[in-house]
Image (cartoon, grey):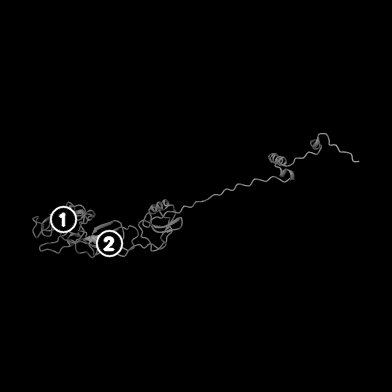
Amino acid sequence: MNQPQHPLPGGREARRSHLPFRVTGRKWREGLGVGALICALLTGCGAADDGAPAAKPRPTVTVTATVTVTPAPMTSQVNSTLAEATEAAERHGYRVVAHDASDKDASPGDDWTVCFEKYTYDSVAFGAVTSDAPCPAKDGRPIPWPSMPTAVGRTYTHAVDAIGKVTDGDITVKASYKDEDVDGDDASDGEYDDWKVCFQSPAPGARVVGDRDVTLWLTEDGCPAAKGTYKDRTNDPDYTPPATAGSTGGTGSAASSGTGGTGGGSAGTTCEIVSNAGNCYDAGQFCRNSDVGSSTHAANGRLIHCRDEGSRNRWNY
C-alpha cells in the first residue's frame, strides 16, 4: 500500500526556504539597473572587464575665419598730388603703390602729379610725374616737354601770354638799345605792353624743361640789327660827328695850349677835349670816365661839361 505523504512542516513556505536563492521578475530588473550604475561610476565597467584601454579624448579644432572687406568706390585721383591720392585711397580701404609714369625710374615724391591709376580688387597703382612736368601719352612713355614759342616781333603782352602756356619761369626784360631804358618793375605795371620784342632767350623752338626762365629784349619802335647798339648814334661815345664849318678839330695838345681858343664859344673855337677818334663832342653824348668833371667846347662852340649821371656819363651844357 502506498503510504500517505505528509507535507513538510510549515507547508509551501517551508519548502521554498530550502530552495537555492533566486531573484525573479521585477525585483531582478531593478537590481540589474542599480548594479550597472554603480559599475559605471566606480570602474568603467566593460573596459575593466575585457582589458581594453579607455577611449582618449578627441583634440579641439579651432576654425579661424578671415573677413575680407571690399574697398569703397572713389573718384578718380588723376591730376591730384600723390600725397592727396594716397590719403584718399587708403581712406577708402585700398592698398597703394606708386611709380614714375615717365620712361625714367625715379622714386615718386609726395608733390608729384598723378597721371595714371590702375585698380585691382583691393589695391591701386598710381603713375606720377614731377609737379612741373606734363603727363606722357601713355604710362612709361617719355615726357612731352613743350617748345619755346616765337616771341620776336610780338608785342610784350602777347609774348608773355604765349610763353606762359609752356613755362611758369620768370620773364626778365631788357632794352634792345643801349640808350633806351627798360625797367622790370615798370613791365609789371604795364608800361611796356605795346613795346615790340626784338630778341629772346631761349630761342624759338628750344625745349622747355620745367619752369624755364625767359629773357626778352624790348624797344618802343624799330628793332636794331643786333643787341647793344645805340638808337641815337650821337649817344655812342665812339661816334664821330661830321665836321662843322669853322671847326679845327684840334688835338689834345693843341687844345691844352689854348691855340686858337677864344673862350667865347665862337665857330672858330678849338675843342679842348676830343673823342678817341679825334673829334669834338656835342651835348648829350657819352663821355669817358676819365673826363668826368672836365669841360670842353663842343663843335658848335658852346661850353659843355662831363657829368656823372648814374649808369652813364654825358656831356651837357
Quadrant, the C terminus? bottom left
Q: Is residue 161 visible?
A: yes
Residue reaching furthest to the right: 1
Residue 238 screen position, x and y as percent: 20, 61
* Amino acid on which the number 1 mark rests in the picture: Trp
In percent of the image, x 17 and y 55: which residue is there? 314
Against 231, residue 7 (above or below) is above
**Residue 294: x %, y % from top left:** 16, 52
Q: Is residue 176 visible?
A: no
Q: Which residue is pictured at 74% across the width and 44% down the height?
A: 49
Look at mark 2 in the image and give the residue it sits on. 162
Question: Where residue 40 sits in the image (x, y, percent)?
Answer: 69, 41
Q: CA distance from mark 1 to mark 2?
A: 42 Å
**Residue 158 vs residue 175, the one in the foreground:** 158
- Can you tell which mark lies on residue 315? 1
Front in this rendered view, residue 280 or 161: 161
Q: Which labelled disc corresponds to residue 264?
A: none
Q: Nearer the viewer, mark 1 or mark 2?
A: 2
Callout 2: SS: helix
In terms of image quadrants, where is residue 173?
Answer: bottom left
Q: Which numbered disc, 1 or 2, marks the residue that appears first in the sequence?
A: 2
Q: Which kind of residue does numbered mark 2 sit on?
A: Ala
